[in-house]
Amino acid sequence: MTILKSIAVIFVGLSGGIAVGIGFVAFLTVLGIIPRLTQLTKTGEYIHVYEWAVIFSVVLASFADLNNISVPVGAAFLIPVGFASGMFIGMLAAALTEVLNVLPIMSKRIGMDGMLITLLMGLVLGKLVGSLFQWLFFANY
């Protein structure tokens, strides 16, 4: 029974990680954040550098988080990092307004025309149930 539980935990962990990774990539792709950054900064020839920076930072941060690695740095280093993080979150928040334009098109394509409120409530309730499940059952981890 222990082997079966271990296999189930591995399966759920990998599935969750893949789902989150795919969601993150789809989110960045749909919003077009990297091409817009290169467009705004007029650095289109460096688009591959932007892409690799995102990939490298996600992999590095995931590795550090999974292995409980922390780097003691001073406030002088944290201020620019916080500023850059704030700019990225601000761009994501601004780009989210465009995602709302995608939902009516998606509802028509999946055959839920006229049921946009149902689709939105499904998304909200799914997020709510998933968050509660994580907080109530995995709060100590």
Image (cartoon, helix red, strand yellow):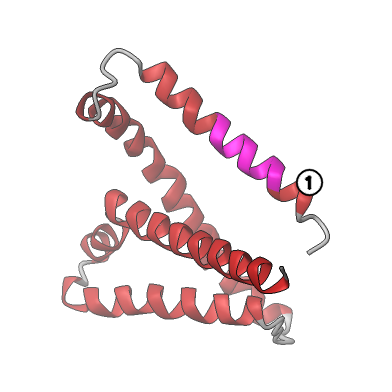
Quarter containing the C terminus: bottom right
Q: Which region shows up in magenta?
A: 125-133
- The secondary structure type at the circle numbered 1 is helix
Is residue 128 rendered magenta in the image? yes
Q: Does the magenta run of residues contain 79?
A: no
User: Where does residue 10 sit, x and y in percent of width and height?
Assistant: 58, 70
Q: Report x, y in % for residue 76.
A: 67, 80
Q: Which residue is found at the position 24% from the left and 66% from the top?
A: 38
Name the residue beneath numbered marker 1: 136
In the rendered image, the vertical position of residue 54 relative to residue 70, given as above or below: above
Q: For the residue marked with disc 1, what is the amino acid?
A: Leu
Q: Quadrant of residue 53?
A: bottom left
Q: Residues within 10 Å of mark 1 (few under 14, many from 20)?
A: few
Q: Quadrant of residue 26?
A: bottom left
Given the current orientation, which residue lies at the most extreme top position? 114
Q: Mostly what secondary structure, the magenta segment?
A: helix
Q: List the single residue furthest toward the right.
A: 140
- Does 118 sit above or below residue 13? above
| Along the viewing direction, whichever of 27 and 3 lies nearer the viewer | 3
Residue at the image position 71 percent from the left and 83 percent from the top: 70
Name the residue located 32 percent from the left edge and 37 percent from the top edge: 98
Where is residue 121? Give x, y as percent. 50, 23
* In the depicted structure, whether residue 1 falls above or below residue 57: above
Q: Position of residue 13 (x, y in %)?
A: 57, 65
**Residue 37 vs residue 134: left or right?**
left
Q: Is residue 51 left or right of residue 4?
A: left
Image quarter hosting the N terminus: bottom right
